[in-house]
Image (cartoon, helix red, strand yellow):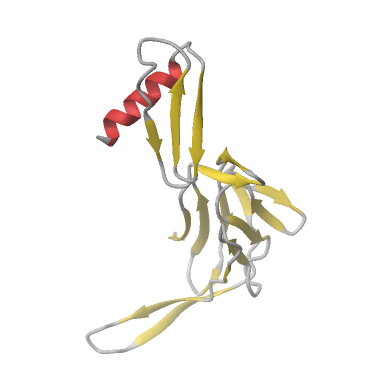
Amino acid sequence: MIAVISMLAARHARSQDSFRGALGPHHRRMQPLSGAEAERHPVEISTGMNFRNGTQWTPSDPTFTVTRGGFMATNIQHKIHISSQLNLSHAVLALSPDGIPIQSTPVAIRLFDAASGSAAIIGLLTNSTGALVTDNQVLFPDAFSGICADVLYTLQKGTFEQDVVFR
């Protein structure tokens, strides 16, 4: 059903007929003004499709901008700020749509053996300066001492990811 709706939405987006529609946080309802399908109202569904821009829903734009102190993404549902230095308290801040802050800082890489119950820290966070590698990715190279690993943050319309990349 969703695939059919997506195909209808794509066909409407490509058509020459203009249309108006209704937006919500995770959907776009299209209402054609004319044409043979004027009575159909396909709905496109996608997590994080739109964000609240003051009083109206606006299509999300999952891109970071470089700021004086790091990287920001404000044209999405969860506002994101990443400090240019990862080795700071609360280096990563995600602000939920209802204003709740979620703060984070990676600290170490730890291995745990469930069979024996033993654990070992194999890498500690060190000084690393972030770089915008694509408009939606921030990379902190050589982010750990004791192990060759980077930290990569990736932003998409409906997701915000932190990956450790071992080299």
Relative side of 149 to 11, left or right: right
Residue 145 higher or lower than 119, as above or below: above
Q: Is residue 36 above or below residue 60?
A: above
Count of numbered marks? 0
Q: Residue drawn 52% across and 42% down?
A: 50
Q: Position of residue 11 (x, y in %)?
A: 38, 19
At 50% from the left and 76% from the top, the residue drawn is 108
Q: Can you say whether 89 is above or below 80 in the image?
A: below
Give left or right: position of 92 versus 43: right
Front-lying residue, 20 or 167? 20
Find the residue positioned furthest to the right: 68
Q: Quadrant of the N terminus?
A: top left
Residue 38 location (% of width, % of height): 39, 16
- Percent across and percent down for residue 117 are 29, 89
| Residue under the point 60% across and 72% down | 126
- Nearest the viewer among 110 and 16 is 16
For this rendering, which residue is in front, 19 or 62?
19
> Which quadrant would residue 82 be assigned to in this image?
bottom right
User: Height in image: 12 above or below 49?
Assistant: above
Q: Is residue 76 left or right of residue 65?
A: left
Q: Residue at x 35, y 15 (%)?
A: 37
* 7 left or right of 64 in image: left
Name, please, the residue furthest toward the left: 115
Residue that sits furthest to the front in the current view: 39
Q: Quadrant of residue 121?
A: bottom left
Q: Quadrant of the C terminus?
A: bottom left
